[in-house]
Amino acid sequence: MEKLQKTVVQHKTRKEPFSSKVHPNIMVLLSLLIGLAVWWLLSTIPSVGSILSNPVTLLKSFMSELQSGRLWSNIYASIFRVLGGFSLGLLAAIPVAFLMGWYPTVRALIEPWIQFFRTIPPIALIPLVIVAFGIGEGAKISVIFVATFLVMVISIYQGVRNVDPTLIKAARVLGATDKDIFLEVVVPASFPYILVGVRLGLASAWTTLVAAELTGASKGLGNMIMEAGLYFRMDLVILGIIIIGVIGFAMDKGVLYLERKLTGWQELRKS
């Protein structure tokens, strides 16, 4: 018996990964340092260095753009467009997804169109958007709205469809009306899917930003990347890409934090 216990303990010790012994923040820092080292090494290769600026050059460009005020202006313009299109997409996606999930007739009418437009890249809509809205902020927000809406409506709809039928049957046995079932059972059970849809929608908004700013933008991170590419300013191109990634990453972490805070009741229920 003692030999068996010793074997089990040794097996558990062997299976425990190194990363579980280290604080997550240290692993993130280690990953960042490794990434910077690989970036630096790649930039020393002449054929690669002409395209991939080294971290020092990028830092100098960042400080230069920051001091001139152009960077803040571009960041503000892009965040405004992303949040505008994303917010409208979320406001439209929630009711449409719940109607599709709750009413089969609505689902049969709307779902084919959702699936059809979901396969069309947002950049293909730019000529139509320019004709309809011109080249103002409305055009850019519209392109982001379409992309985020189509992503979020599918995710939220799946959440409504995946509600446990046993919960709905139990609520009916207890005398709950359709309104009560919808508000007290379906909505809470679908809430995690709404947050997943928010994460996917934000990611889609940032990936669509450059396409949206093709509609005649004079400011914005996507516009900065395109203009820098025309003049072969690879340092500014990479800087714009990194800033978009950092802001998108920070927003995603913020939604994850909200998810942990707002869906903690589900973990308690599972335990």
Image: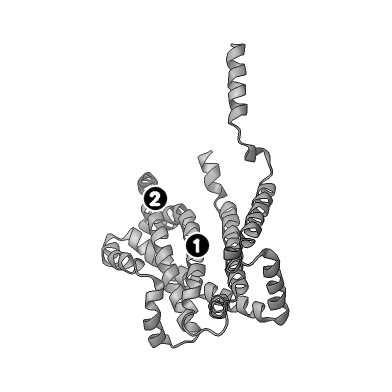
Relative to 173, is 130 above or below?
below
**Considering only vertical position in the picture, is 1 above or below 245?**
above
The kind of residue on which mark 1 rests is Val
Viewer-side residue, 8 vs 256: 8
Q: Position of residue 150 (x, y in %)?
A: 39, 67
Q: Earlier in the sequence, mark 2 or mark 1?
A: 2
Farthest top residue in view:
1
Q: Which mark is residue 198?
A: 1
Residue 173 lies, in percent from the top left, at 35, 45
Q: Residue at x 71, y 66 (%)?
A: 56
- Check if mark 2's residue and mark 1's residue have beta carbons within 8 Å: no
Quadrant placement of the C terminus: top right
Where does the N terminus fall, quadrant-wise? Answer: top right
Q: Residue at x 70, y 76 (%)?
A: 66
Residue 127 position in % (x across, y down): 38, 82
Q: How crowded is the residue under tag 2: few (<14 C-alpha within 10 Å), some, or many (20+)?
A: some
Figure quadrant of residue 37: bottom right
Residue type for callout 2: Val
Mark sitting on residue 39? none
**Of discs 2 and 1, which sits in the foreground?**
1
Q: Is residue 137 left or right of residue 35?
A: left
Q: Is residue 136 above or below residue 235?
A: below
Q: Nearer the viewer, residue 49 or 196?
A: 49
Mark 1 neighbour class, 10 Å CA radius: few under 14, some 14 to 19, many 20 or more: many
- Report the number of discs: 2
- Give the SS element for disc 1: helix
* Left or right: 166 in relation to 245: left
Which residue in the structure is indicated by mark 2?
Answer: 163
Per the model, the C-alpha gap separating discs 2 and 1 is 19 Å
Q: Position of residue 99 (x, y in %)?
A: 35, 64
Residue drawn at 50 percent across, 74 percent down: 210
